[in-house]
Amino acid sequence: MSNMIELKEKANNYAEENAMCFLKEAFAKVYADGYHDGYKDCEEEIPANLSTSQTEFVDLGLPSGTLWANDYERDENNVVFVPFGDAEKYSIPNAEQWDELANKCKWEYDKAGSFKEAYAIGPNGKILKFSLSGLIHVNNIVEGGKVFFWISDEKDGEEKTAVSIYDVHKNGINYSEKSLVNIYSGYKLPIRLVRKK
């Protein structure tokens, strides 16, 4: 009987010593897993203050009923620039919606000295303004004299579709051009949202 009590005592001592070790290892693993998951979430996160709840939309009277955001998405007062992978998580326009805007609206351009803004005037007379945005490439805004914004694109590859509105000087003639262009998906462009009525 005394051997049995001695065995129980040894087992309890062993359990106490090893339980602490086991718990320490388990808690360390839980902590490390949580840290890594949080870090991964942070890396993939779109800027935290990007909020569509305050986005104002303009009804231009387009046949499809598409409403366009009054401005680029902003964080406080600054235009938010994101790579395509982040932009596609939002309700950005598709090629058909851009085509409708480009062809059903009358377009005018502010060129006081140089190209500054483009205006889409809807069939109902309401106006949508596109200010120069440029794009961000290696932490610098490049091609700053152009309007850019992402549109949805499901094709494979590293280049994705964006709208570009810019001034062209050819043969002594100055005119504005609006078109779809392919841009490297890692560059950061502003986004313009759309929704249905």
Image (cartoon, rainbow, N blue to C red):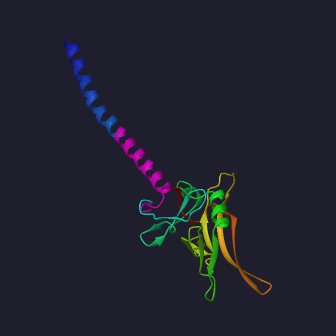
The answer to whether 83 is drawn above or below residue 134 in the figure is above
Dividing the picture into quadrants, the one containing residue 152 is bottom right
Viewer-nearest residue: 26 or 90: 90
Q: Residue at x 61, y 88 (%)?
A: 112
The answer to whether 79 is drawn above or below residue 111 in the figure is above
Looking at the image, which residue sits at the far right?
Answer: 171
Dividing the picture into quadrants, the one containing residue 151 is bottom right
x and y, in percent, of residue 119 in the image: 59, 74
Looking at the image, which residue sits at the far top?
Answer: 1
Viewer-nearest residue: 2 or 175: 175
x and y, in percent, of residue 19 in the image: 30, 32
| Whether residue 134 can be seen here | no
x and y, in percent, of residue 79 in the image: 50, 70
The answer to whether 129 is drawn above or below residue 192 in the figure is below
Viewer-nearest residue: 82 or 14: 82
| Residue 49 magenta | yes
| Whether residue 57 can be seen here | yes
Dividing the picture into quadrants, the one containing residue 16 is top left
Quarter of the image for the N terminus: give it: top left
Q: Main secondary structure of the magenta part?
A: helix
| Residue 159 magenta | no
Q: Residue at x 46, y 61 (%)?
A: 47
106 left or right of 16 in image = right
The total of numbered circles placed on residues is 0
Looking at the image, which residue sits at the far front?
Answer: 124
Viewer-nearest residue: 66 or 16: 66
x and y, in percent, of residue 150 in the image: 60, 62
Specify the segment rendered in magenta: 25-51
41 left or right of 168 in image = left
